[in-house]
């Protein structure tokens, strides 16, 4: 029987997910039946066309800002190659708006977690080509979260380890609770074994995916469990790996840090990073209420103080333009950030609100930002106190068009 080719469309932005899915598929599919690779350009996909119907699957995993690009590309692929390729999509945007990709020509869209649904679909596709009729493929129940590989280290394709999935909060701008309704966590043993594999493959550092790094080991009764965090980090430290925790691509919640300041000392004891990223979003309690955040503005200031006193550089994430935010809220947020720059030498990651499908704020218009506020942001950037995609996002999401 001929092999089915699976080609992940690699964009750089989807590197972590592609690495994870490649690991999953190389470990669950029979290599006698499948080949798995990536394509960085459309021409690489065209070059693989064998003229055989149902022989090649092109897989897109994407977020909303990539949706227009992906839809245009899928339209071209299907127009030129027709049934010779089958296009499948997954990720935050397809999960929230599957029809958006189907209308563009995708054959199947996976919603939510795909650890079980994707391998099952691929086996069916290979064994009985043309018989999978469902166009929207819902998630199947997962095994224990430790049952799945962390990323494709066997292919020398490294990524942060997802140590916790999902979030107990329900922020109005965030897709995470909708995509991952259930909270899952990797065990300390799983993470330690992954660290050992990273070291064995010649790398020296470990990074994590987790919505709030300080939520590791927590439950409904204990929103932060400092002992669980220390157990994780001390076990990892014993392997000799360099630990990057509480910084990109994860962050810490101001409410977790302000209420459990001892966690800063634990992070300082074990981690390599000199910065900690704090999900502040706004310094206006009114706007934090609109966003549905689990912290108040004072928690941001307290977090900055704790981090600076512990020897970390605090990086505060800020999101302007959320629907309902007013000029006075933006000015307050900027004033608080400017004073924290002076007092605790924070840096600010500035972002502009983008309404994401599947969130309560989808369909709402971002609030315009005054020139005076933009000038204050530009000055922070110029002086090295701020960075982020604020001006790019403002351009992409222009409310005046
Ligand atoms: S705390 Fe973070 S991950 Fe959780 S819902 Fe809010 S923005 Fe999303």
Image (tube, rainbow, N blue to C red):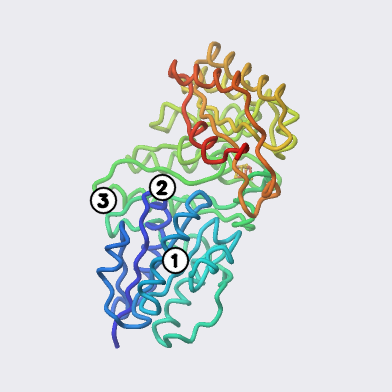
Residue 158 on image: x %, y %: 33, 51
Return the residue at label 2. 160
Relative vertical location of residue 343 with respect to residue 211 in this rendering, above or below:
above
Disc on the earlier residue, 1 or 3: 1
- Marks 1/2 in contact by CB < 8 Å: the verdict is no
Give SS at disc 3. Answer: helix
Left or right placement of residue 34 versus residue 338 in this view: left
Give SS at disc 2. Answer: loop
Residue 141 on image: x %, y %: 58, 70
Relative vertical location of residue 19 with respect to residue 211 in this rendering, above or below:
below
Figure disc tally:
3
- Where, quadrant-wise, is the C terminus in this rendering? top right
Front residue of this view, candidates 303 and 259 = 303
Instruction: Residue 343: name its quadrant.
Output: top right
Instruction: Residue 29: name its quadrant.
Output: bottom left
Return the residue at label 1. 75
In the image, farthest residue toward the front: 401
Q: Quadrant of ligand 1?
A: top right
Cα separation between marks 1 and 2: 32 Å
Cα separation between marks 1 and 3: 43 Å
Residue 313 on image: x %, y %: 47, 22
Front residue of this view, candidates 82 and 14 = 82
Residue at point 53% right, 52% down? Answer: 64
Residue 165 on image: x %, y %: 55, 52
Q: Which mark is residue 354?
A: none
Disc on the earlier residue, 1 or 2: 1
Disc on the earlier residue, 3 or 2: 2
Front residue of this view, candidates 165 and 18 = 18
- Tell me the mark number nearer the camera, choosing from 1 and 3: 1
Q: Which mark is residue 200?
A: 3
Residue at point 27% right, 63% down? Answer: 44
Cα separation between marks 3 and 2: 16 Å
């Amino acid at each position: 029987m001929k092999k089915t080719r699976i080609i992940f469309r690699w964009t750089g932005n989807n590197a972590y997910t592609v690495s994870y899915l490649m690991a999953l598929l190389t470990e669950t599919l029979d290599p006698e039946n499948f080949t798995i690779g990536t394509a960085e350009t459309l021409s690489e996909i065209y070059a693989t066309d064998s003229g055989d119907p149902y022989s090649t699957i092109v897989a897109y995993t994407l977020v909303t800002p990539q949706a227009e690009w992906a839809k245009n590309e899928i339209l071209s692929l299907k127009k030129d190659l027709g049934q010779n390729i089958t296009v499948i999509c997954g990720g935050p945007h397809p999960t929230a708006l599957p029809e958006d990709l189907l209308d563009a020509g995708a054959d199947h869209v996976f919603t939510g977690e795909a650890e079980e649904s994707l391998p099952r679909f691929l086996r069916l596709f290979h064994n009985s080509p043309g018989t999978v009729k469902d166009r929207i493929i819902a998630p199947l129940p997962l095994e224990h979260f430790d049952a799945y590989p962390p990323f494709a280290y066997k292919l020398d394709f490294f990524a942060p380890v997802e140590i916790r999935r999902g979030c107990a909060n329900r922020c109005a701008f965030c897709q995470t609770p909708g995509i991952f309704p259930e909270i899952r966590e990797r065990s300390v043993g799983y993470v330690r074994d992954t660290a050992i594999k990273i070291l064995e493959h010649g790398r020296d550092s470990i990074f994590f995916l987790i919505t709030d790094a300080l939520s590791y080991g927590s439950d409904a009764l204990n929103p932060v469990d400092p002992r669980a965090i220390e157990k994780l980090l001390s076990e990892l430290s014993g392997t000799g790996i360099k630990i990057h925790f509480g910084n990109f691509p994860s962050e810490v919640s101001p409410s977790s840090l302000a209420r459990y300041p001892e966690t800063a000392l634990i992070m300082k004891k074990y981690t390599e990073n000199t910065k900690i990223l704090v999900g502040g979003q706004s310094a206006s309690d009114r706007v934090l209420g609109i966003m549905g955040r689990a912290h108040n503005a004072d928690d941001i200031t307290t977090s900055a103080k704790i981090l600076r006193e512990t020897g970390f550089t605090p990086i505060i994430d800020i999101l302007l333009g959320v629907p309902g935010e007013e000029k006075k809220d933006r000015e307050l947020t900027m004033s608080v950030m400017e004073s924290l720059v002076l007092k605790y030498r924070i840096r600010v990651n500035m972002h502009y609100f983008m309404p994401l499908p599947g969130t309560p704020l989808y369909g709402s218009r971002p609030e315009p930002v005054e020139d005076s506020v933009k000038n204050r942001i530009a000055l922070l950037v110029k002086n090295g106190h701020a960075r982020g995609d604020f001006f790019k996002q403002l351009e992409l999401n222009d409310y005046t068009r």
